[in-house]
Image (cartoon, rainbow, N blue to C red):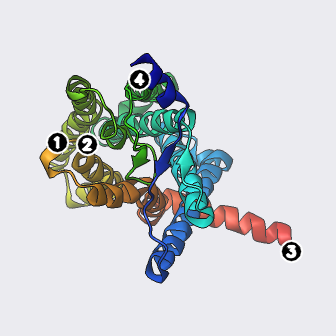
Amino acid sequence: YNSKSWINATSDFILLGLFQHTSFHLFLFIVLLTIAIASLMGNALMILLIHRDHRLHTPMYLLLSQLSFTDTILVFTIVPKMASGFLTGKKSISPAECGLQILAFLTLGGGECFLLAAMSYDRYVAVCHPLRYNILMNWQLCLRMTLGSWFLGAADGLVQAVATLSFPFCSAHEIDHFFCEAPSLLHLACADTSIFEHVMYICCVVMLLVPLFLILTSYSLILAAVLHKSTEARKKAFATCSSHLTVVGLFYGAAIFTYMRPKSYRSANHDKVVSAFYTIFTPALNPLIYSLKNNEVKEALKRWLGKCINIKH
Protein backbone atom coordinates (compact mmCIF):
# COMPACT_ATOMS: atom_id res chain seq x y z
CA TYR A 1 0.00 0.00 0.00
CA ASN A 2 2.82 2.44 0.89
CA SER A 3 4.69 1.50 -2.29
CA LYS A 4 1.51 2.03 -4.31
CA SER A 5 0.93 5.43 -2.72
CA TRP A 6 4.53 6.41 -3.50
CA ILE A 7 4.10 5.40 -7.15
CA ASN A 8 0.88 7.40 -7.32
CA ALA A 9 2.56 10.45 -5.79
CA THR A 10 5.19 10.51 -8.55
CA SER A 11 3.03 9.47 -11.57
CA ASP A 12 1.49 12.11 -13.80
CA PHE A 13 -2.23 12.28 -14.59
CA ILE A 14 -3.56 12.52 -18.16
CA LEU A 15 -6.23 15.16 -18.90
CA LEU A 16 -8.42 13.78 -21.70
CA GLY A 17 -9.56 17.33 -22.49
CA LEU A 18 -12.68 18.92 -23.92
CA PHE A 19 -12.02 18.42 -27.65
CA GLN A 20 -11.12 15.67 -30.12
CA HIS A 21 -8.87 16.38 -33.13
CA THR A 22 -11.63 16.95 -35.71
CA SER A 23 -12.29 20.05 -37.85
CA PHE A 24 -15.52 20.80 -35.94
CA HIS A 25 -13.76 20.52 -32.56
CA LEU A 26 -10.95 22.76 -33.88
CA PHE A 27 -13.61 25.37 -34.70
CA LEU A 28 -15.08 25.01 -31.16
CA PHE A 29 -11.59 25.34 -29.67
CA ILE A 30 -10.99 28.61 -31.60
CA VAL A 31 -14.39 29.95 -30.43
CA LEU A 32 -13.59 29.03 -26.81
CA LEU A 33 -10.10 30.56 -27.00
CA THR A 34 -11.57 33.77 -28.49
CA ILE A 35 -14.09 33.96 -25.63
CA ALA A 36 -11.30 33.39 -23.08
CA ILE A 37 -9.20 36.22 -24.60
CA ALA A 38 -12.29 38.49 -24.65
CA SER A 39 -12.87 37.58 -20.99
CA LEU A 40 -9.31 38.57 -20.03
CA MET A 41 -9.56 41.86 -21.96
CA GLY A 42 -13.02 42.70 -20.57
CA ASN A 43 -12.07 42.02 -16.95
CA ALA A 44 -8.71 43.81 -17.30
CA LEU A 45 -10.56 46.84 -18.71
CA MET A 46 -13.04 46.77 -15.81
CA ILE A 47 -10.18 46.69 -13.25
CA LEU A 48 -8.39 49.51 -15.12
CA LEU A 49 -11.51 51.73 -15.22
CA ILE A 50 -12.23 51.23 -11.51
CA HIS A 51 -8.60 51.89 -10.60
CA ARG A 52 -8.20 55.00 -12.81
CA ASP A 53 -11.59 56.74 -12.33
CA HIS A 54 -11.95 58.35 -8.87
CA ARG A 55 -15.77 58.43 -9.29
CA LEU A 56 -15.71 54.62 -9.12
CA HIS A 57 -13.74 54.54 -5.85
CA THR A 58 -16.70 53.25 -3.82
CA PRO A 59 -17.23 49.94 -1.92
CA MET A 60 -19.52 48.62 -4.68
CA TYR A 61 -16.84 49.06 -7.36
CA LEU A 62 -14.06 47.74 -5.12
CA LEU A 63 -16.08 44.51 -4.82
CA LEU A 64 -16.73 44.53 -8.58
CA SER A 65 -12.97 44.92 -9.25
CA GLN A 66 -12.35 41.89 -6.99
CA LEU A 67 -14.93 39.92 -9.01
CA SER A 68 -13.12 40.89 -12.25
CA PHE A 69 -9.76 39.95 -10.70
CA THR A 70 -11.19 36.55 -9.62
CA ASP A 71 -12.51 35.88 -13.13
CA THR A 72 -9.17 36.86 -14.72
CA ILE A 73 -7.18 34.46 -12.50
CA LEU A 74 -9.79 31.72 -13.08
CA VAL A 75 -9.29 31.92 -16.86
CA PHE A 76 -5.47 31.90 -16.40
CA THR A 77 -5.78 28.82 -14.13
CA ILE A 78 -7.77 26.74 -16.62
CA VAL A 79 -7.32 27.89 -20.23
CA PRO A 80 -3.50 27.86 -20.86
CA LYS A 81 -3.16 24.20 -19.79
CA MET A 82 -6.26 23.20 -21.80
CA ALA A 83 -5.00 25.07 -24.90
CA SER A 84 -1.44 23.68 -24.72
CA GLY A 85 -2.81 20.13 -24.26
CA PHE A 86 -4.97 20.46 -27.39
CA LEU A 87 -2.29 22.16 -29.56
CA THR A 88 0.78 20.12 -28.54
CA GLY A 89 -0.87 16.81 -27.62
CA LYS A 90 0.98 16.85 -24.26
CA LYS A 91 -1.92 16.11 -21.92
CA SER A 92 0.00 15.02 -18.82
CA ILE A 93 -0.21 17.01 -15.58
CA SER A 94 1.87 16.34 -12.45
CA PRO A 95 0.17 15.73 -9.06
CA ALA A 96 1.62 19.06 -7.82
CA GLU A 97 0.14 20.98 -10.79
CA CYS A 98 -3.12 19.09 -10.34
CA GLY A 99 -3.25 20.03 -6.63
CA LEU A 100 -2.53 23.69 -7.50
CA GLN A 101 -5.37 23.69 -10.05
CA ILE A 102 -7.82 22.27 -7.48
CA LEU A 103 -6.62 24.78 -4.85
CA ALA A 104 -6.82 27.77 -7.22
CA PHE A 105 -10.16 26.74 -8.73
CA LEU A 106 -11.88 26.22 -5.36
CA THR A 107 -10.28 29.34 -3.82
CA LEU A 108 -11.56 31.46 -6.70
CA GLY A 109 -14.97 29.74 -6.89
CA GLY A 110 -15.55 29.86 -3.12
CA GLY A 111 -14.27 33.43 -2.92
CA GLU A 112 -16.65 34.46 -5.71
CA CYS A 113 -19.64 32.97 -3.83
CA PHE A 114 -18.95 35.18 -0.81
CA LEU A 115 -18.03 38.21 -2.97
CA LEU A 116 -21.45 37.98 -4.65
CA ALA A 117 -23.05 37.83 -1.17
CA ALA A 118 -21.07 40.94 -0.11
CA MET A 119 -22.20 42.72 -3.29
CA SER A 120 -25.85 41.88 -2.55
CA TYR A 121 -25.47 43.36 0.97
CA ASP A 122 -23.99 46.49 -0.63
CA ARG A 123 -27.06 46.78 -2.92
CA TYR A 124 -29.40 46.22 0.06
CA VAL A 125 -27.78 49.09 1.99
CA ALA A 126 -27.76 51.36 -1.12
CA VAL A 127 -31.48 50.81 -1.81
CA CYS A 128 -32.92 50.42 1.70
CA HIS A 129 -30.64 52.73 3.74
CA PRO A 130 -29.21 55.27 1.25
CA LEU A 131 -28.68 58.01 3.89
CA ARG A 132 -26.69 55.64 6.12
CA TYR A 133 -24.74 54.01 3.25
CA ASN A 134 -21.35 55.51 4.18
CA ILE A 135 -21.74 54.30 7.79
CA LEU A 136 -23.19 50.81 7.11
CA MET A 137 -20.97 50.09 4.08
CA ASN A 138 -17.68 51.71 5.16
CA TRP A 139 -14.27 50.92 3.67
CA GLN A 140 -13.18 48.89 6.70
CA LEU A 141 -16.19 46.55 6.40
CA CYS A 142 -15.69 46.31 2.63
CA LEU A 143 -12.04 45.29 3.13
CA ARG A 144 -13.01 42.73 5.79
CA MET A 145 -15.64 41.18 3.51
CA THR A 146 -13.15 40.99 0.63
CA LEU A 147 -10.41 39.37 2.76
CA GLY A 148 -12.99 37.07 4.39
CA SER A 149 -14.19 35.89 0.95
CA TRP A 150 -10.64 35.04 -0.14
CA PHE A 151 -9.84 33.33 3.18
CA LEU A 152 -12.96 31.10 3.15
CA GLY A 153 -12.35 30.13 -0.49
CA ALA A 154 -8.67 29.36 0.20
CA ALA A 155 -9.50 27.25 3.31
CA ASP A 156 -12.00 25.16 1.32
CA GLY A 157 -9.55 24.79 -1.61
CA LEU A 158 -6.62 23.76 0.59
CA VAL A 159 -8.59 21.11 2.51
CA GLN A 160 -10.10 19.58 -0.66
CA ALA A 161 -6.82 19.64 -2.65
CA VAL A 162 -4.79 17.95 0.11
CA ALA A 163 -7.53 15.40 0.92
CA THR A 164 -8.15 14.50 -2.77
CA LEU A 165 -4.46 13.90 -3.54
CA SER A 166 -3.96 11.83 -0.37
CA PHE A 167 -5.93 8.91 -1.87
CA PRO A 168 -4.12 6.05 -3.67
CA PHE A 169 -4.97 6.08 -7.39
CA CYS A 170 -5.43 3.13 -9.74
CA SER A 171 -3.12 2.43 -12.66
CA ALA A 172 -5.34 4.29 -15.17
CA HIS A 173 -4.48 7.93 -14.48
CA GLU A 174 -6.80 9.37 -17.13
CA ILE A 175 -8.98 12.24 -15.91
CA ASP A 176 -12.05 12.65 -18.15
CA HIS A 177 -11.97 16.46 -17.90
CA PHE A 178 -10.03 19.46 -19.25
CA PHE A 179 -8.69 20.49 -15.82
CA CYS A 180 -8.15 18.91 -12.41
CA GLU A 181 -11.41 19.00 -10.50
CA ALA A 182 -11.82 17.07 -7.23
CA PRO A 183 -14.94 15.01 -8.22
CA SER A 184 -13.28 13.86 -11.50
CA LEU A 185 -10.11 12.87 -9.65
CA LEU A 186 -12.03 10.84 -7.05
CA HIS A 187 -13.30 8.52 -9.83
CA LEU A 188 -9.69 7.28 -10.17
CA ALA A 189 -9.18 6.52 -6.45
CA CYS A 190 -8.61 2.89 -5.45
CA ALA A 191 -9.80 3.49 -1.87
CA ASP A 192 -13.30 4.05 -0.50
CA THR A 193 -13.99 7.78 -0.97
CA SER A 194 -17.62 7.81 0.23
CA ILE A 195 -16.90 9.54 3.59
CA PHE A 196 -14.79 12.24 1.90
CA GLU A 197 -17.47 12.70 -0.80
CA HIS A 198 -20.06 13.33 1.96
CA VAL A 199 -17.71 15.87 3.60
CA MET A 200 -17.09 17.50 0.20
CA TYR A 201 -20.85 17.69 -0.39
CA ILE A 202 -21.32 19.43 3.00
CA CYS A 203 -18.51 21.89 2.06
CA CYS A 204 -20.32 22.62 -1.20
CA VAL A 205 -23.60 23.20 0.67
CA VAL A 206 -21.84 25.67 3.01
CA MET A 207 -19.88 27.43 0.24
CA LEU A 208 -22.85 27.65 -2.16
CA LEU A 209 -26.06 27.73 -0.15
CA VAL A 210 -25.00 29.98 2.78
CA PRO A 211 -23.99 32.88 0.44
CA LEU A 212 -27.05 32.16 -1.75
CA PHE A 213 -29.30 32.44 1.34
CA LEU A 214 -27.66 35.81 2.18
CA ILE A 215 -28.17 36.99 -1.42
CA LEU A 216 -31.85 35.93 -1.48
CA THR A 217 -32.42 37.59 1.93
CA SER A 218 -30.87 40.87 0.69
CA TYR A 219 -32.99 40.90 -2.45
CA SER A 220 -36.18 39.94 -0.57
CA LEU A 221 -35.63 42.97 1.71
CA ILE A 222 -34.94 45.18 -1.36
CA LEU A 223 -38.13 43.94 -3.03
CA ALA A 224 -40.18 44.55 0.12
CA ALA A 225 -38.74 48.08 0.41
CA VAL A 226 -39.30 49.19 -3.23
CA LEU A 227 -42.87 47.86 -3.47
CA HIS A 228 -44.03 50.83 -1.38
CA LYS A 229 -42.07 53.39 -3.42
CA SER A 230 -42.84 55.30 -6.64
CA THR A 231 -42.51 53.78 -10.11
CA GLU A 232 -39.36 55.86 -10.71
CA ALA A 233 -37.76 54.55 -7.51
CA ARG A 234 -38.67 50.97 -8.46
CA LYS A 235 -37.07 51.42 -11.91
CA LYS A 236 -33.90 52.83 -10.34
CA ALA A 237 -33.71 49.94 -7.83
CA PHE A 238 -34.25 47.39 -10.61
CA ALA A 239 -31.51 49.02 -12.76
CA THR A 240 -29.14 48.93 -9.77
CA CYS A 241 -29.76 45.28 -8.94
CA SER A 242 -30.55 43.59 -12.28
CA SER A 243 -26.91 43.24 -13.44
CA HIS A 244 -25.87 41.66 -10.13
CA LEU A 245 -28.87 39.28 -10.15
CA THR A 246 -28.01 38.18 -13.71
CA VAL A 247 -24.42 37.35 -12.67
CA VAL A 248 -25.68 35.51 -9.54
CA GLY A 249 -28.11 33.45 -11.65
CA LEU A 250 -25.43 32.42 -14.17
CA PHE A 251 -22.81 31.58 -11.54
CA TYR A 252 -25.04 29.73 -9.06
CA GLY A 253 -27.04 27.90 -11.73
CA ALA A 254 -23.87 26.31 -13.16
CA ALA A 255 -22.22 25.68 -9.76
CA ILE A 256 -25.27 24.02 -8.17
CA PHE A 257 -25.80 21.88 -11.31
CA THR A 258 -22.18 20.69 -11.11
CA TYR A 259 -21.68 20.14 -7.38
CA MET A 260 -25.10 19.37 -5.91
CA ARG A 261 -26.52 16.80 -8.31
CA PRO A 262 -26.80 13.21 -7.04
CA LYS A 263 -23.90 11.02 -8.22
CA SER A 264 -26.25 8.81 -10.31
CA TYR A 265 -27.14 11.83 -12.51
CA ARG A 266 -23.53 12.83 -13.18
CA SER A 267 -22.02 12.44 -16.65
CA ALA A 268 -18.48 13.40 -17.69
CA ASN A 269 -19.65 15.17 -20.87
CA HIS A 270 -22.30 17.22 -19.03
CA ASP A 271 -19.74 18.14 -16.35
CA LYS A 272 -17.23 19.30 -18.97
CA VAL A 273 -19.76 21.49 -20.81
CA VAL A 274 -21.05 23.11 -17.60
CA SER A 275 -17.48 23.58 -16.31
CA ALA A 276 -16.59 25.33 -19.59
CA PHE A 277 -19.64 27.56 -19.09
CA TYR A 278 -18.68 28.85 -15.64
CA THR A 279 -14.87 28.88 -16.09
CA ILE A 280 -14.79 30.58 -19.52
CA PHE A 281 -18.23 31.91 -20.62
CA THR A 282 -19.39 33.44 -17.32
CA PRO A 283 -16.12 35.40 -16.72
CA ALA A 284 -16.55 36.85 -20.25
CA LEU A 285 -20.20 37.77 -19.63
CA ASN A 286 -19.63 39.48 -16.24
CA PRO A 287 -17.89 42.67 -17.51
CA LEU A 288 -20.35 42.81 -20.43
CA ILE A 289 -23.38 42.61 -18.10
CA TYR A 290 -22.01 45.25 -15.71
CA SER A 291 -20.93 47.65 -18.48
CA LEU A 292 -24.16 47.39 -20.51
CA LYS A 293 -26.48 47.85 -17.52
CA ASN A 294 -24.41 50.36 -15.54
CA ASN A 295 -24.37 54.03 -16.58
CA GLU A 296 -21.46 54.88 -14.24
CA VAL A 297 -19.23 52.26 -15.90
CA LYS A 298 -20.30 53.45 -19.39
CA GLU A 299 -19.51 57.06 -18.46
CA ALA A 300 -16.12 56.03 -17.02
CA LEU A 301 -15.34 54.16 -20.27
CA LYS A 302 -16.27 57.26 -22.34
CA ARG A 303 -14.04 59.49 -20.17
CA TRP A 304 -11.12 57.04 -20.45
CA LEU A 305 -11.51 56.72 -24.24
CA GLY A 306 -11.75 60.53 -24.47
CA LYS A 307 -8.46 60.88 -22.56
CA CYS A 308 -6.80 58.27 -24.82
CA ILE A 309 -7.94 60.13 -27.97
CA ASN A 310 -6.74 63.49 -26.55
CA ILE A 311 -3.30 62.02 -25.72
CA LYS A 312 -3.10 60.59 -29.25
CA HIS A 313 -3.83 64.01 -30.83
Query: What amino acid is found at the position of numbered circle 3 in the picture?
Result: His
Which quarter of the image is occupied by the C terminus?
Answer: bottom right
- x, y percentage for residue 15? 47, 51
Locate residue 70 relative to residue 122 in the image: left or right: right
Locate residue 222 relative to residue 76 in the image: left or right: left
Q: Is residue 271 above or below residue 155?
A: below
- Crowd tier of the residue under label 3, counting other residues whose Cα lies within 10 Å: few below 14, some 14–19, many 20 or above: few
Please report contact status of discs 3 and 2: CB closer than 8 Å, yes or no: no
Q: Nearer the viewer, mark 4 or mark 3?
A: 4
What is the secondary structure assignment of the residue under circle 1?
Answer: helix
**Spatial separation of the CA atoms under disc 4 and disc 1:** 43 Å
- The residue pinned by badge 4 equals 166
For this rendering, which residue is in front, 299 or 7?
Answer: 7
Q: Which mark is residue 313?
A: 3
Q: Nearer the viewer, mark 2 or mark 4?
A: 4
- The residue pinned by badge 1 equals 220
Most extreme residue toward the top is: 2
For image coordinates 76% across by 66% down, the residue present is 308
Please report contact status of discs 2 and 4: CB closer than 8 Å, yes or no: no
- x, y percentage for residue 193? 25, 28
Q: Earlier in the sequence, mark 4 or mark 3?
A: 4
Query: What amino acid is found at the position of numbered circle 4 in the picture?
Result: Ser
Please report contact status of discs 2 and 1: CB closer than 8 Å, yes or no: no
Which quarter of the image is occupied by the N terminus?
Answer: top left
Most extreme residue toward the bottom is: 23
Q: Which mark is residue 9?
A: none
